[in-house]
């Protein structure tokens, strides 16, 4: 959960500074944050499936 909060805070920081950063830098940072959120989502889904499968 902490990773999700950190990713969203980082996304807010990047979106807020997007007006000052060059477009390629903003796109790269956005893609990195999106990848981070996808990894987090995959881990959480796998963890949830493992918990429900044991019951």
Image: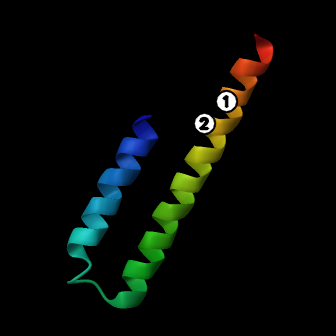
Q: Alpha-carbon distance for marks 1 and 2?
A: 5 Å
| Image location (x, y in percent) of residue 15 | 28, 70
Q: Quadrant of residue 21?
A: bottom left
Q: What number is the disc on residue 15?
A: none
| Image location (x, y in percent) of residue 7 | 40, 52
Q: Residue at x 34, y 61 (%)?
A: 11
| Residue 31 appears left or right of 12 | right
Which residue of the protein is positioned furthest toward the right in this rendering? 53
Q: Residue at x 36, y 46 (%)?
A: 6
Say which residue label 2 marks: 44
| Image location (x, y in percent) of residue 52 | 72, 20
Nearer to us in this view, 32 or 42: 42
The local secondary structure at tag 1 comes to: helix
Say which residue label 1 marks: 47
Q: Residue at x 43, y 44 (%)?
A: 4
Answer above or below: position of 20 versus 9. Answer: below
The answer to the question of whether label 1 and label 2 lie on touching residues, with beta carbons closer than 8 A, is yes
| Residue 2 appears left or right of 32 | left
Nearer to us in this view, 8 or 24: 8
Answer above or below: position of 15 versus 9. Answer: below
The crowd level at tag 1 (other Cα within 10 Å; few <14, some 14-19, many 20+) is few
The local secondary structure at tag 2 comes to: helix
């Amino acid at each position: 959960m902490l990773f999700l909060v950190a990713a969203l805070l980082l996304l807010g920081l990047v979106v807020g500074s997007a007006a000052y950063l060059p477009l390629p830098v903003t796109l790269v940072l956005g893609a990195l944050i999106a990848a981070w959120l996808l990894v987090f989502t995959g881990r959480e889904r796998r963890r949830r499936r493992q918990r429900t499968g044991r019951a």
